[in-house]
Amino acid sequence: MPVEFLSDGEAAAYGRFSGAPSQAELERFFYLDDADRTLIAERRGAHARLGFALQLTTARYVGRFLTGPLDVPDEVLTYLGEQLGIEDVSQINQYTERRNTPFEHQEVIRKAYELKEFSQAEVDFIVWAGARAWNTGDGKKTIFYDGVTWLRTNKVLLPSVTTLARLVARVRDEATDRLHDALRGVLSPRQRVILEMLLEVSEGRRASDLERWRKGPAAPSGRESGEGAGARRGSEWGWGPCRCRRRCRTGGWSTWRGTACRPRRPRCAATDTPASSPRCWPR
């Protein structure tokens, strides 16, 4: 089942086989030592011994017992069969004929290897995840995968992907809210009002000031840079903006550039207005 911050593929690969294990993984997780063989030898029947070994090594590899104990790659069955001296690994199909057998074996494995259910470690996990979110500011996905490592290191069987993802998301959001409350507490009432005003969208605009600031300044073109520099110099000199247009006069009629008359040097419109108008920038 897809969750908020995991893709469908990531959620599907959680706590199960995503393909055949490599040779190195087979030797690391599926090798049966003396303690494993002692427990396996107590099972009667080749199918029971192979099934017990399969559930034991599956929990060691993926961190949990599978809903379908036989949903494993053929390479795993072959590797376990060779160690147990079972040539016909197809006998594993008899393992689930008695419904309670896989659950009884899971209980034996939990006690023998001191594995804990997630409900037994949930409080400790919440404390760890909360401290991780508060101290590092890591995102939900990072905390999720590091949480899987934490659970496996502490011999805790993994819960369902939905259970763990929702718990991580809740703890992360709580840490974020706590951080916001702490930051708000150091602000004065006036600062709070100013910050809240940044979220308001003024009439005629589509975004708030905060949203516009988040985009950062745009890189100006050469022409815009020159005009901006000129504007700054003009403001320093105390001159207002220039409203200039190109025109020429023939017989008292104004004719725009591109017509029959020859355009003259640009004239400032301020010369045609009363003397009280702003001064024009020099040419």
Image (cartoon, rainbow, N blue to C red):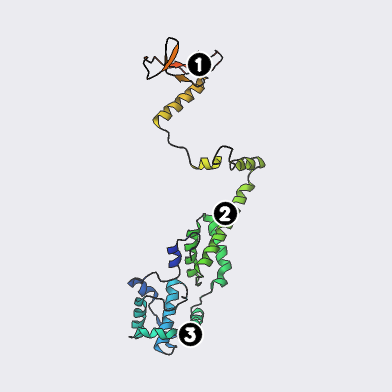
Front disc: 1 or 2: 1
Residue 176: assigned label: 2
- Residue 160 appears at what percent x and percent y? 51, 69
Residue at the spot x=64%, y=41% of the render? 193
Q: In the drawing, does residue 62 fall left or right of residue 199? A: left
Q: Dividing the picture into quarters, in which one does residue 47 lie?
A: bottom left
Q: Amino acid at mark 2?
A: Thr
The answer to which of 282 and 262 lies nearer the viewer is: 262
Q: CA distance from mark 2 to mark 3?
A: 46 Å
Residue at the spot x=42%, y=73% of the render? 61
Q: CA distance from mark 1 to mark 2?
A: 58 Å
Residue tagged by mark 3? 101
Residue 270: assigned label: 1
The answer to which of 205 and 215 lies nearer the viewer is: 205
The answer to which of 243 and 237 lies nearer the viewer is: 243
The answer to which of 153 and 1 lies nearer the viewer is: 1
Front disc: 2 or 3: 3
Tag 2 secondary structure? helix
Q: Dividing the picture into quarters, in which one does residue 38 lie?
A: bottom left
Q: Is residue 169 visible?
A: yes
Tag 1 secondary structure? helix
Q: Residues within 10 Å of mark 2 (few under 14, many from 20)?
A: some
Q: Is residue 130 visible?
A: no
